[in-house]
Image: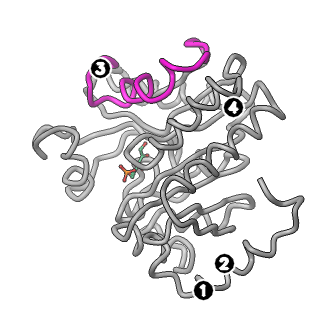
Amino acid sequence: MEVLIFDNEADVSSYAARIFSKLMRRKPDAVLGFATGSTPEPMYAEMRRQHTEESLDFGRVTTFNLDEYVGLAADDRNSYHYYMWKVLFDHVNVRSDRINIPDGMSNDVPATCDDYEKRIQAAGGIDLQVLGVGGDGHIGFNEPTSSLASRTRIRTLTQKTREDNARFFGAVSDVPRHCITMGIGTIMDAREIVLLAFGERKANAIRQVVEGPISAMCPATVLQLHAKATVLIDKGAASRLRLKEYYKEVAANKPDWQRV
Ligand code: F6R
């Protein structure tokens, strides 16, 4: 696992956007895995800028989002469909028939989940997946104790996640209890993964993800088993890492060919 520590959120976000744009220029029909929440928003802003100012082309990419709330329609302001159109899809030339987000209004959730897995496979698998991380170490909506081999399925959100996300809804009671999420096994199948985190409120999770034992109690720790996972964090999120100085030394002395 590579750990890169940046001065601030803006530097993390532009580096993450560069990882995406480098892939998209090398492989214009890349399959991109997207996340929602506050964390990737500045990265999407940077992607919008690169589309407008540097002709970053989304015309042939396919996208898969990690998750969606059960019971929220695509036009609900709190749905992840709505979020993705607002922060990215409305502003770039992505084809709507190549956008995939789990259907939170499905009448047959198991079939929808099964179909999502099949669509990822039919697209050739995800080339690059971006992740945020919950304070409890969740990735997608795979809460603690999720099977590390899980596939796309319905999950029940923890009270903590519902409280964390209440800031978007107004009240905790308005946050749906269920979601459809890619499984941890699904996420781990991505060829490359970048996990972003900002601020001290994520510092405990990041310490576990990078230096803790692998455990379903902190699902993101499974990334230690991924051959190409990069953790991009600001100083706050890095503040509890024991080997912080070592990660900085590694980054400062990277050979040029390894730089993005
Ligand atoms: C969202 C997602 C979640 C978030 C996590 C952190 O698609 O998969 O795992 O990444 O809840 O959320 P923020 O970024 O709002 O702190």
Q: Are marks 4 and 1 in contact (CB under 8 Å)?
A: no
**Is residue 46 found left or right of 169 in the rendered image?**
right
Q: Earlier in the sequence, mark 4 or mark 3?
A: 4
Q: Are marks 1 and 2 in contact (CB under 8 Å)?
A: yes
Pick whichever, 123 or 163, lies toward us: 163
Q: Which residue is mark 4?
A: 31
Where does the image place residue 38, in percent across and percent down from the top left? 38, 46
Mark 2: give few (<14), some (14-19) or many (20+) Cα within 10 Å.
Answer: some
In the image, the residue with mark 4 has its CB under 8 Å from the nearest atom of ligand 1: no
Which numbered mark, 4 or 2, is in the foreground of this view? 2
Mark 3: give few (<14), some (14-19) or many (20+) Cα within 10 Å.
Answer: some
Q: Earlier in the sequence, mark 2 or mark 3?
A: 3
Which numbered mark, 2 or 3, is in the foreground of this view? 2
Vertical arrangement, residue 236 with respect to residue 30, above or below: below
Q: Earlier in the sequence, mark 3 or mark 1?
A: 3
Vertical arrangement, residue 211 with respect to residue 81, above or below: below
The amino acid type of the residue labelled 3 equals Ala
The amino acid type of the residue labelled 2 equals Tyr
Pick whichever, 21 or 154, lies toward us: 21
Q: Which residue is mark 3?
A: 73
Q: Which residues are magenta?
A: 74-97
How many numbered discs? 4
Where does the image place residue 236, in percent across and percent down from the top left? 43, 71
Which numbered mark, 3 or 1, is in the foreground of this view? 1
- Residue 247: which disc? 2
Report the residue at 45% width, 79% height from top: 239
**Is residue 157 found left or right of 231 in the rendered image?**
left
